[in-house]
Amino acid sequence: MNLAALLSGGKDSMYALYLAGRENKITYIVTITSENPESYMFHVPNVHLVEEQAKLMGIEIIKKTTKGEKEKELEDLKSVLGTIAGKVDGIVTGAIESNYQKQRVDKICKELNLKSLAPLWHKSPEGLLRSMIKDGFEIIITAVAAPPLDDKWLGRKIDEKCVEELVHLNKKYGIHPSGEGGEYESLVLDCPLFKKKLEVSESKKIWDEKTRSGHLVVDAVA
């Protein structure tokens, strides 16, 4: 099948693209930039780097900006997917457990007569993280919003030690190992699909002590 992949720049959407691309052709990358940092549907930190990732994979990118208003942002997603509905057979997303996101993408795909593919759906979060590492994904954490995750996690590489700590935090505090509940966000710097690695050229930590949350603003070049 010819597919389009919804890509945020983070680990889940990129790994879903990677898995779906093994047996299908990814012909488009679709990225939505939300003006609302609290978007219900879309990953926000460092989404500007998706364009660079798309270049490294040699895949055409389609970009759309949304105000990020709940439910209204779905119309923006539908409108952009509608422009390629006749050119692809389906849409790939990185949903793992979020019924909110998956049900809404499924509905839009049904209305546009597209297949909705979610290769990570209901897979073991810990298993997925270990598979990403095994498959050569280099991932850093770019946002945290769940104590005891703190500013020291910003910029941290997701390696085996990091996975062990996330599993421990899941058992002790209920933090989702893959950050599916918004506990953390990530950025893929390298994977087997890239012609070369993204190198962080500049980064800045933004931290709010009151909410115990923050993010890393990243500039990166290949």
Image (cartoon, rainbow, N blue to C red):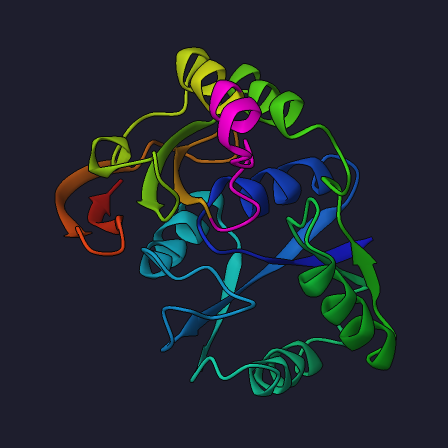
Residue 37 at x, y percent in the picture: 36, 69
Residue 98 at x, y percent in the picture: 68, 54
Is residue 39 visible in the rendered image? The answer is yes
> How many discs appear?
0
Query: In the depicted view, which residue is nearer to us: 166 or 113?
Result: 166
Relative to 201, is 59 on the left or the right? right
- Based on the picture, tell me whether residue 175 belongs to the magenta stretch: yes
Magenta span: helix, strand or loop, mainly? loop
- Based on the picture, tell me whether residue 34 belongs to the magenta stretch: no
* Residue depicted at x 21% and y 31%: 152
Residue 56: which quarter of the image?
Answer: top left
Relative to 4, is 86 on the left or the right? right
Query: In the depicted view, which residue is nearer to us: 88 or 68?
Result: 68
Residue 18 at x, y percent in the picture: 63, 37
* Residue depicted at x 80% and y 60%: 116
* Residue depicted at x 66% and y 51%: 26
Q: Quadrant of the C terminus?
A: top left
Residue 148: which quarter of the image?
Answer: top left
Is residue 86 visible in the rendered image? The answer is no
Residue 143 at x, y percent in the picture: 33, 47
* Residue depicted at x 49% and y 84%: 69
Q: Is residue 32 above or below residue 165?
A: below
Query: In the depicted view, which residue is nearer to us: 84 or 109?
Result: 109
Q: Is residue 149 above or below residue 214?
A: above
Q: Which residues are magenta?
A: 168-182
